[in-house]
Image (cartoon, helix red, strand yellow):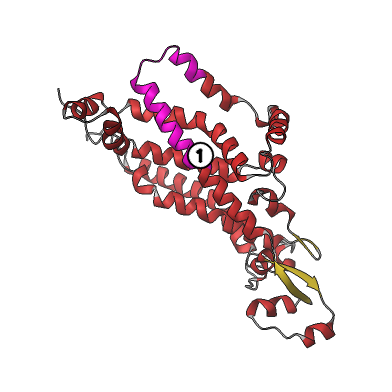
């Protein structure tokens, strides 16, 4: 019986499949627990031993998006609930007095996260193309210097950045946070995209230049479509960093530009930490990154050069 060197045997496939399935289950269990907690009541969320199956309620989401105050029985009777979420709140002896600040914080995350991702990918693509195609003096030293900025722990530059932002009036502003996250992500963007662009044969651009294209047209119409896989991958990594970043958001924002990560842990209920509301905020916070990744999945699965140039 002959065996293939490259084709795994059936037992190997079964073992690999079981390992992947086990890893997937272990990875997704915390997410499923967070999502299920968002649909529990406060008592069920802190019950011990933990309750896997409990009564379904949207109270956590109502608490997340509203500001509430305790009311007397007479006041609640005088103002009967008009909507389903008013009824949920009234059952706990509370009344809604207005919206919470989670919506504003969530929109700040969207603006800052996607804004910094766009700038990081845009500037990183231009810089990576220049490093890949042109002769730049001290290119290797410059690339190492760019990468070294990624090695530095954020806490090492926290105080200088705080003082600089305060002096420039960038503290607690969207522009300041976008510029900061762009600067942090730019090193990763340049290095990732340079690797992808290096794999694109130069003959493609040379053929375009011979056909009368300018350098910019060759870059826009030939290189960018070929580098779509790298751009998509880089955008996902940059967005994940900007979306989840906590340290600089706590240090440099407090109101106008505060993002969701520093805000979610501060959600306090009448009896202390409102865990269903915290879980609801975390669940909603997961959605944009998941949607963004799903939308770009086809680019992640495509080849980088679609074949080789024949000589």
Is 99 situated left or right of 241 in this image?
right
Q: Can I make out residue 26 in this image?
A: no
The residue located at (69%, 38%) in the rendering is 169
Where does residue 56 sit, x and y in percent of width and height? 62, 72
* Quarter placement of the C terminus: top left
How many discs mark residues in the rendered view?
1
Q: Is residue 129 magenta?
A: yes
Where is 25 relative to 143, above or below? below
Where is 103 relative to 180, above or below? below
The residue located at (22%, 33%) in the rendering is 307
Which residue carries the number 1 mark? Answer: 238
The residue located at (75%, 68%) in the rendering is 43
Is 241 situated left or right of 93 in this image?
left
Where is 268 relative to 62, above or below? above
- Name the foreground residue: 166 vs 63: 166
Q: Is residue 38 magenta?
A: no
Secondary structure state at the residue bearing disc 1 = helix
């Amino acid at each position: 019986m002959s065996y293939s060197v490259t084709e795994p045997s059936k037992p190997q496939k079964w073992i690999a499949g079981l390992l992947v399935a086990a890893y997937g289950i272990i990875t997704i269990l915390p997410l499923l627990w967070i999502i299920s907690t968002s649909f529990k009541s406060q008592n069920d969320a802190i019950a011990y031993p933990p309750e896997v199956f409990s009564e379904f309620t949207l109270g956590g989401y109502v608490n997340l998006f509203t500001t509430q105050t305790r009311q007397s029985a007479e006041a609640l009777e005088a103002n009967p609930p008009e909507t389903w979420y008013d009824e949920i709140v009234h059952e706990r002896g509370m009344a809604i007095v207005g919206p919470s600040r989670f919506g504003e914080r969530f929109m700040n995350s969207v603006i800052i996260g996607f804004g910094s991702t766009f700038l990081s990918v845009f500037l990183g693509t231009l810089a990576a193309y220049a490093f890949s195609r042109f002769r730049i003096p001290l290119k290797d030293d410059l690339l190492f210097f760019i990468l070294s900025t990624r090695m530095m722990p954020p806490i090492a530059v926290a105080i200088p950045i705080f003082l600089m932002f305060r002096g420039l009036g960038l503290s607690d502003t969207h522009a300041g946070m976008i510029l900061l996250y762009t600067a942090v992500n730019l090193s990763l963007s340049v290095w990732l995209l340079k690797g992808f662009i290096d794999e694109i044969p130069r003959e493609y651009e040379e053929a375009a230049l011979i056909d009368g294209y300018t350098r910019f047209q060759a870059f826009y119409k030939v290189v960018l479509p070929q580098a779509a896989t790298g751009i998509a991958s880089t955008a996902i990594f940059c967005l994940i960093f900007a979306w989840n970043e906590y340290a600089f958001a706590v240090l440099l924002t407090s109101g106008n530009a505060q993002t969701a990560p520093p805000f979610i842990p501060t959600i306090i209920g009448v009896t202390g930490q409102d865990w269903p509301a915290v879980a609801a905020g975390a669940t909603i916070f997961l959605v944009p990154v998941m949607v963004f990744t799903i939308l770009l999945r086809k680019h992640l699965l495509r080849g980088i050069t679609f074949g080789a140039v024949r000589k």
